[in-house]
Image (cartoon, grey):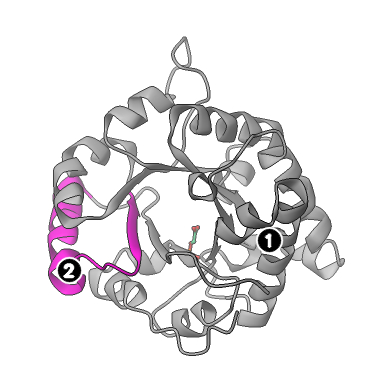
Amino acid sequence: MSTNVRTPLMAANWKMHLSVAEAVSFIAKLHEIVGTPQDREVLIAPPFTHLWPLREAMTAAGFSLSAQNCHWERQGAFTGEVSLTMIQETGCRYVIVGHSERRHIFGESDAWIGLKTAAALVHGVVPIVCIGEKIEEREAGLTEEVLRRQLTAGVEGVSLQDPNRLVIAYEPVWAIGTGKTATPQQAQEAHAFVRQWLAKRFDKAVANGVRILYGGSVKPDNVDDLMAQPDIDGALVGGASLQVTSFARIVQFTRSVKNG
Ligand code: PGA
């Protein structure tokens, strides 16, 4: 178990949803409801085309902007790709790397995810590295093996002194968009495993400082129980982040029994 020194990070992954106009009014409304929280960080990852138009409103609200993906090269003949220099130019502090939809629908390899993580760190953009097992892997007792493999490929090679420069998101594939959430205990076990891995790879201070988010059917009615777990430092929310009242409630989680 680890000490709770980490600022909770409540992140909306909008995937391929919402128009720019809808996004602008979402942010205004969210700010109206939650204000600019001092004890937690609010992050939105909209589609690429929305980053620039949202930049000012996000800064004014004190929310953090994130891209959903990136390419690791600075520039070049990579049709359809967006570099970290470009992402940084839009005011993004974060980039999601290795989301399971990127891995499983678009065939991204562990090795690519490692390249993206390393490139994000070089550019000073904080990578949110997503990892998580499929249902058949969990049922075969392979969860830790899968997480170890994905962590090794995604993070092993980077150098990291400041834990605020890396975020890990544990997103069991079977819980994404399915309405099946991992139980708080299942999620806690996986998070504790990730933190131990970080302690071995880096050191205890880094491991205690890196935020580990849970993702997979996070909703207003399960966020409090998830956030009560000592190693869950935030949420990466898909479906429930598309309705402003629902995401606002998630941002306003209350953490009753954080015992770390
Ligand atoms: P979900 O998606 O909340 O709709 O399960 C989470 C994610 O894909 O990051």
User: Residue at image x 19%, y 66%?
Assistant: 30
On screen, residue 68 versus residue 202, left or right, reads left
User: Residue at image x 65%, y 74%?
Assistant: 188
Residue 72 in sight in this render: yes
**Residue behind mark 2:** 35
On screen, residue 63 versus residue 260, left or right, reads left
Mark 1 touches mark 2? (CB < 8 Å): no
Q: In which quarter of the image is residue 260?
A: bottom right
Q: Which stretch appears magenta?
A: 19-45
| Mark 2 nearby-residue class (10 Å; few <14, some 14–19, many ≥20) | some
Magenta segment includes 3: no
Residue 82 in sight in this render: no
Frontmost residue, 56 versus 209: 209
Q: Considering only vertical position in the picture, is 55 above or below 174? A: above
Which circle's residue, 1 or 2, is located before the other in the chain? Answer: 2
**Residue behind mark 1:** 195
On screen, residue 108 versus residue 258, left or right, reads right
How far apart are labels 1 and 2 at the CA level?
31 Å
Q: Considering only vertical position in the picture, is 133 above or below 240? A: above
Give coordinates of residue 257: x percent, y percent: 52, 89
Element at badge 2?
A: loop
Give coordinates of residue 60: x percent, y percent: 14, 51
Q: Considering only vertical position in the picture, is 151 above or below 72? A: below
Give coordinates of residue 78: x percent, y percent: 48, 16
Residue type (three-letter) at the residue carrying disc 1: Arg
